Image: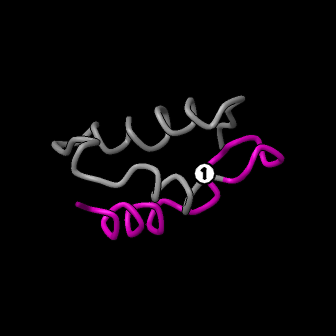
Amino acid sequence: MSTYATRDEAINREIIDAIEAGEASRDEFDIDAIADAVLGDHAAGYAVQVDEAEFWQIVAANAR
């Protein structure tokens, strides 16, 4: 699991990059809501705190 010094870096690398690796765009999702649901706080090093299946369920639930 990767950890990041800033929340923005974690969002870009763990959420936006994952979404845009396919055919979707960040504009199709509520990125802040996804980040709130999947990222730990700074004490956890800004890392994804859910497994891959749960991550994609959260992404799908936050489609615009």
- Residue 52, horizontal then vertical, whole percent: 48, 59
- Residue 58, horizontal then vertical, whole percent: 42, 66
Please state which of residues 11 and 50 is positioned toward the viewer in this rendering. 11
Q: Which residue is mark 1?
A: 48
- Residue 27, horizontal then vertical, whole percent: 24, 43
Q: Is residue 61 above or below residue 14?
A: below
Please say whether residue 27 is one of the residues in the magenta stretch.
no
* Left or right relative to 11: residue 47: right
Please state which of residues 31 and 4 is positioned toward the viewer in this rendering. 31
Please say whether residue 47 is one of the residues in the magenta stretch.
yes
Q: Residue at x 58, y 62 (%)?
A: 50
Q: Residue at x 28, y 42 (%)?
A: 26
- Residue 1, horizontal then vertical, whole percent: 66, 44
Give the amino acid at mark 1.
Val
- Quarter assignment of residue 8: top right
Q: Dot 1 lies on which element?
A: loop
Q: Residue at x 76, y 41 (%)?
A: 45
Q: Residue at x 79, y 48 (%)?
A: 44
- Number of marks in picture: 1
* Left or right relative to 8: residue 16: left
Please state which of residues 30 and 44 is positioned toward the viewer in this rendering. 30
- Quarter assignment of residue 4: top right
- Quarter assignment of residue 16: top left
The span shown in magenta is 40-64
